[in-house]
Image (spheres, rainbow, N blue to C red):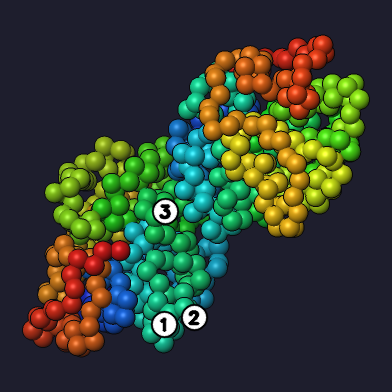
């Protein structure tokens, strides 16, 4: 089924994404979270749940729902925030981040309704997503299966094993989305284990690839509206993104992967999200989990 | 009935069963034609196969997955732990040529820590049948349980007719007041020979087939330790983490102790060769086992040990 690629209300999605970024900033204290890595994925995740995937609070266990697997894992604050904005998760629960009494922690887990599978160890969910896509091929289901990967995650050989197998089984119901924010945990991807030319790599493995601006909702909509990209081929979307997107004071900084801000910084960062001046950060950098 | 016949029958009776392999087809040669799309060969990708089996199980399928035991349990270890153990998904792992059954392959193929590492994963159950008869008696319950399960596949044919399987229970072959041998897997065959020799030397000897290693039959262990002057753990596994360790754990848990002689691979890999020669070289023939227990040589004859056919 082709989606209507003509129109999209960008402003509505931008408003949701701004709120999600606010949630991420508020989770970036009292223990902190993977702020930079989460902010790059916000627009992708908001778009997918708002416009592309058949997932809502009433069909979370329905066999006909679509599937989203967050393989990157440490960007789960973007998922918590999106779930809160779209009514899948009580907003109050975001205040329980890292609380022993809830399950809102640094990596995804299935205690949160809507999270299909836990992650944290990289390179796992491409194969789990393959299993779901294979079942749909066997049973004749038309559900879509999306797996979001980090670019640094592509160092893991199992990502590429999964592309080989998806190609062999012609899994055109499966979409790998790469959050291409150019960073792995501590360094630029291209300075450590170069990935480019990334689209060519996926194409050489048999995938149908689209490369787009992962912060532009119209681009996202045009790309995903073309699903399935080619009959019998794994779909790959390389979404070019910016680590820390939305907070200029931490954008594209290697040392702002994981952030644990002070209360004062949080107040300033929330204003910065809305276009105020950059925050003067004094909290410890290079906090690496 | 063979493993493949049982699997075929099971898969044809239950549409939810999916047969997977990481290009190890020895046990499933005829299944591609019979099962069509329900046969999935992921190629030489043990990790991806396990991840995909988790995804299939999320959709309600019961994947029975195949690979050489060494690669299934070690190459894919973290995938088993993380993708099957954490969510407790009913994926059934069939490890081929475990333990000494990898005979001439060499140490890369020796799964002799598989029981230690698989039983260490919460939710994962572990089974080690004595022979093909035991295997096909055990698998229906293993495959219909709600948990991930690792089975040390052993398709060797013996003359022994095993008792019906009860998950979590050992098969008590005989009780004895002097010695009880606790064993599992292909060494059961040699244990039967050892028992005969020990009895002809005038000893009262028991034998227990520890076919269900997790959950384990604690009562059978406690009874053997209470009844016998000596308990022997006999296993084609490193001495660490297998049956000897299980016995130690059970005894400590129940605040008791026993005289226990472990016969296992003591902190080393075994010398690769054809199986009969491996058994002889490593001291695992029935005659050698009996003589190690007795502490002296006997005039008894070791029956011939059949060489398994090559199959990968």
Query: Where's residue B266, x and y in %?
Result: 58, 32
| Residue under disc 3 on the same chain as residue under disc 1 | yes
Q: CA distance from mark 3 to mark 2?
A: 27 Å
Q: Nearer the viewer, residue B220 or B29?
A: B220
Outermost residue, left side: A277
Label 1 SS: helix
Query: Taking the image as drawn, is residue B268 in sight?
Result: yes
Q: Residue at x 70, y 46 (%)?
A: B247
Residue at (51% x, 51% y) in the render: B81
The numbered disc on residue A170 is: none
Q: Earlier in the sequence, mark 2 or mark 1?
A: 1
Whole-percent x and y of residue B154? 68, 30
| Residue underneath mark 3 | A125
Q: Residues within 10 Å of mark 1 (few under 14, many from 20)?
A: some
Residue at 55%, 59% in the rendered image: B87
Q: Which residue is mark 1?
A: A96
Q: Where A186 sits versus A54, above or below?
A: above
């Amino acid at each position: 089924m082709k989606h209507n690629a003509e129109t999209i209300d960008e402003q509505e999605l931008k408003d949701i994404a701004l709120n999600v970024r606010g949630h991420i900033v508020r989770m970036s204290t009292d223990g902190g979270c993977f702020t930079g890595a989460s902010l790059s994925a916000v627009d992708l995740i908001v778009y997918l749940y708002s416009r592309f995937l058949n997932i809502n609070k009433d069909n979370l266990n329905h066999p006909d729902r679509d599937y989203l697997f967050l393989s990157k894992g440490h960007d789960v604050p973007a998922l918590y925030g999106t779930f809160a904005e779209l009514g899948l998760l009580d907003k109050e629960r975001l205040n329980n981040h890292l609380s022993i009494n809830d399950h809102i922690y640094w990596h995804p887990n299935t205690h949160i309704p809507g999270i299909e599978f836990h992650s944290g160890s990289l390179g796992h969910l491409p194969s789990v997503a393959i299993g779901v896509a294979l079942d749909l091929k066997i049973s004749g289901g038309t559900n879509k299966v999306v797996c979001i990967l980090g670019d640094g995650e592509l160092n893991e050989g199992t990502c590429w094993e999964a592309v080989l197998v998806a190609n062999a089984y012609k899994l055109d119901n499966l979409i790998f989305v790469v959050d291409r924010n150019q960073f792995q945990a501590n360094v630029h991807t291209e300075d450590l284990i170069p990935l480019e030319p990334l689209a060519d790599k996926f194409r050489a493995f048999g995938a149908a690839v689209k490369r787009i601006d992962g912060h532009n909702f119209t681009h996202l909509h045009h790309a995903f509206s073309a699903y399935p990209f080619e009959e019998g081929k794994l779909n790959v979307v390389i979404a070019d993104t910016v680590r820390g997107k939305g907070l200029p004071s931490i954008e594209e900084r290697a040392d702002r992967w994981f952030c644990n801000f002070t209360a004062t910084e949080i107040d300033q960062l929330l204003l910065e999200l809305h276009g105020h001046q950059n925050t003067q950060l004094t909290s410890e950098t290079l906090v690496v989990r | 009935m063979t493993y493949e016949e049982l699997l075929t029958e099971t898969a044809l009776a239950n549409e939810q069963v999916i047969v997977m392999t990481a290009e190890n087809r020895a046990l499933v040669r005829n299944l591609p034609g019979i099962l069509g799309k329900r046969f999935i060969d992921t190629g030489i990708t043990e990790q991806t196969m396990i991840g995909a089996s988790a995804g299939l199980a999320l959709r309600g399928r019961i994947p029975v997955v195949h690979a050489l035991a060494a690669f299934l349990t070690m190459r894919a270890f973290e995938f088993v732990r993380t993708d099957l153990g954490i969510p407790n998904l009913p994926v059934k792992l069939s490890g081929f040529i475990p333990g000494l059954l990898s005979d001439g392959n060499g140490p890369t193929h020796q799964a002799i820590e598989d029981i230690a590492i698989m039983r260490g994963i919460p939710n994962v159950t572990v089974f080690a049948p004595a022979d093909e008869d035991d295997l096909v008696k055990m698998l229906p319950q293993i495959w219909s349980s709600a948990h991930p399960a690792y089975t040390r596949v052993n398709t060797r044919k013996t003359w022994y007719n095993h008792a019906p399987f009860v998950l979590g229970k050992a098969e008590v072959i005989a009780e004895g007041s002097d010695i009880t041998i606790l064993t599992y897997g292909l060494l059961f065959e040699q244990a039967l020979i050892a028992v005969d020799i020990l009895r002809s030397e005038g000893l009262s000897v028991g034998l227990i087939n520890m076919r269900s290693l997790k959950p384990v039959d604690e009562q059978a262990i406690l009874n053997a330790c209470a009844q016998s002057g000596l308990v022997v753990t006999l296993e084609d596994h490193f001495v660490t983490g297998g049956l000897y360790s299980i016995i130690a754990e059970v005894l400590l848990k129940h605040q008791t102790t026993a005289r226990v002689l472990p016969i296992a691979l003591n902190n080393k890999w075994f010398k690769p060769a054809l199986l009969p020669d491996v058994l002889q070289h490593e001291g695992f023939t029935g005659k050698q086992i009996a003589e190690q227990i007795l502490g002296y040589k006997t005039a008894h004859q070791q029956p011939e040990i059949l060489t398994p056919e090559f199959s990968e």
